[in-house]
Amino acid sequence: MPGLPTGTVTFLFTDIEGSTRLLGRLGDRYAGVLAACRQLLRTSCAEQDGREIGTEGDGFFAVFSTARDALAAAVSAQRALSAQPWPDGADVRIRMGLHTGEAALTDAGYVGMDVHVAARICAAAHGGQVLLSYAAGALLARNLPPGVALRQMGSHRLKDLAEPQPLFQVVVEGLRSDFPLLRTLDNLPNNLPRQLTSFVGRDREAAEIKTVLAGTRLLTLTGAGGSGKTRLALQIVADLLDHYPDGVWLIELASLSVPALLPQAAASVLGVAERPGRPLDETLLEHLRSRSMLLVFDNCEHLLQSCASLVDVILRRCPHVRILATSREGLGIAGELTYAVPSLSVPDPGGVFVPNDLLRYEAARLFVERVMASNAKFRLTEGNTRAVAQVCSRLDGIPLALELAAARANVLTVEQLAARLDDRFAVLTAGSRVALPRQQTLRATMDWSYDLLSESERTVLRRLSVFVGGCSLEAAEAVCSGQGIDEHDVLDLLTQLVNKSLVIADLLGTEVRYRMLDTIRQYAQDRLSASGEAAELQQRHRGWYLRLAQQAAERIVGPEQLMWLNRLELEHDNLRAALDWSSPDAADAERRLRLAGALVRFWDYHTHWGEGRTWLEAALAESRGMASAARTTALEGAGFMAWRQGDLASATALYDESLSLARELGNQKSVVEALVGRGVVAVAQGNLEAATGLFEESLELAQQLEEPWLIAMTLAQLGVVIRWKGDYSKAVALCERSLAMYRRVGGKRGIAYSLRLLGHATRLAGDPARATEAYRESLALFRETADKWVATECIEGLALIANAHGDEARAARLLGAVEAARERFGIKMPRPERGAHDRFGAADLERLKEKDLADVWTEGRTMTLEQAVALALEDH
């Protein structure tokens, strides 16, 4: 395309909003509407010296030498489109996006990220709306045509772009200027990840999949590893965000190794908390039953049976949920449609191409874009098109293989790449004839990348595969060093692997974590198994995470509590893997017990009750007959999780066994914890006298041990049971002592917890002012502790105080928020029946609603817990 402007240019993308709807309404006349739109756009662009680059579907792409010319063309076109009479009064609206940048110009046209930025800005607009990138807006801000202004729209996440983009809206005198929220990832409910690279090709497949998905409840994208199933799925669902009022949610399964934890993974993504005494999958289904959403189950192949079972029941019981799955094979359930994801289109390796013709093939476009990202000096020319065609063909158009090959373009020419791939494929062709060709091709690419590494790099890559979900530098140094790898060399070797695109370095806060793409990790795991080091590396891995968990268990009750909780959550997949590895060695069973026991408070604070109980009971079964402190701790933890789930019979048996073993071993600290646990169960069973005796015994022992945290915990529980018995002044004194001890220890969750108890006790003792102060101080810690249970209890207490003072509207609003939060998060703690003095009964709730407060109550139910906390903290 000779004569196109170079250097800094401005791109204009447009398309017709609701083109499918218009086509259905206008039928054959739609072609005339499309032609008229294009003619108006061409005229406006030509008047400002713009060059038309191309049209695709209902889209239009042009380029301008200056941003002012591009803006003038866009404004002129929108005015002309607004004045144009359309057949049958059709409402034809065109959205537009402008971006200024320096995209590379090849013989085939413009290539590079700036082109994609302009297209994505256009996609974020509504019909009749013109959006500008920050780069374009900055150039135009002081040089606007008459009657035109810019409105700042803030920063927005756009599909395919790694960083949020600041956007401007063009406001044109006489044209519409008010539009709905931009069609961006920020404004629609979803958890879709940011994409760091552009999406290339797949236009036909994407259109077909959208059509098929619109007509089925379950569509599974199938294909070999590395074929781009996940990337294609994410692109499609990002385009469909505004079709699902309750959002589009990605459930990533690649790092999940235990089938039984699939409901937990889904619940975690959807924010569904476990409810005591109820299976998590039932709670999950209840959450989904009335919602209209799209779920993406990604990488199902290693959990096929569990995925099939869960998806089947969701489809049967949740009529408005649609599911898109990715797997190497279909789920095999009724109603499923499958779509085989093909490789990207590839050129003939023996053909002769000019650049423009070669870039018609998707594999070539992807490869060239990625090479240019890796090597800014690369240009596609007639001299290297043959080598590019050979690389694309030899790699069979598999996206992952192309990406890996392109990553080497900063150290090898495409001709060298083609030659090396030829040699490698020749070796593999002589191997197994029964393996799928694409598997052979992907293996060839991985073998080639692996063979390019030094021996030290290969060793670290293999060993790094033992981590699940990434790792810190300290963990990599501890686990990957030894036997030829010095600990101080690990950082340099990781850096080299990052530079060679085999390892990804993610900046999370102030820490860099290292991870591998799943396909690369699987390849490295195969190499680790072949090396004979796997068993030793698993033990090193478990040792590291056992030390981490034990360190966290000691500090999780102190002032660094939140930091350690966040760190354990970040390492959750690695902790699961460490628990999952087992051997017949008795010492290994002991380590598993110690690891599970060290994670009890983490599982509790983050409401992983079912998962925690599963791991604890597995460790206990493996160590049956063993008498050790670790088993005592695990029994206590399992009893606690059973209590959380409302299984009081199991909780009693587990605590009794723990108490017996602790006394046998002379472990007084464990005796205290078992007594407290047994007392908590007694409270839930309504046996207040027994609970009082257990708490008094545990308090006496805790004081003898001089353990501040144990004393604080026991005082708090004793205060609870005394309050239930109606001695409010004594309950206040016990809560004050507990609070003082928690403040001494420094754990903010403990402080918030004891403040909540003090609020209850002082309110019932007739001191609402002091109760309000305690509740609010506890709520002020919510943003740090994220303790939803304590927050709802405090808000409820403040609602009761408001009601007692005649402010029924405030009480109804707060209680509506509490009710909704408890339902949403599954907050239902086992406890004895409360009297009218401690909580509204059903009759009180109905009376509030009868007093014309139903609307206020409903308004409260629409609030988030964070909003309810803010309302409760307001002076009133």
Image: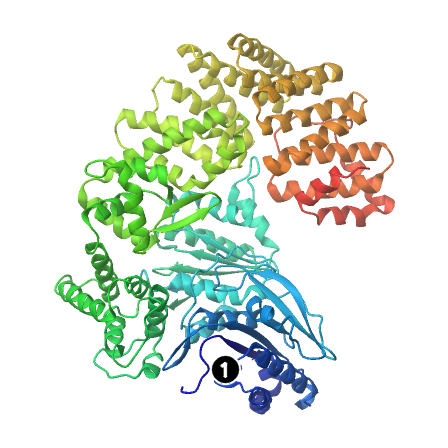
Residue at image x 53%, y 30%?
561
Callout 1 amino acid: Gly
Q: How many marks?
A: 1
Residue that label 1 marks: 57
Vertical arrangement, residue 168 with respect to residue 676, above or below: below
Q: Quick check: can you spot residue 219?
A: no
Residue at image x 54%, y 45%?
282
Which is more toward the observer, 117 or 810?
A: 117
Left or right of 641 on screen, residue 338? left
Which is more toward the observer, 15 or 526?
A: 15
Residue at image x 34%, y 20%?
625
Q: Position of residue 37 (x, y in %)?
A: 59, 87
* Quadrant location, the C terminus: top right
* Quadrant location, the N terminus: bottom left
Q: Position of residue 316 (x, y in %)?
A: 52, 57
Q: What coloring was used for the rendering?
A: rainbow
- Secondary structure at badge 1 equals loop
Q: Quadrant of residue 204?
A: bottom left
Q: Position of residue 384 (x, y in %)?
A: 25, 77
Q: Quadrant of residue 666?
A: top left
Which is more toward the observer, 433 or 392?
A: 392
Q: Quick check: can you spot residue 352?
A: yes
**Label 1 packing within 10 angstroms: few (<14), some (14-19), many (20+):** few
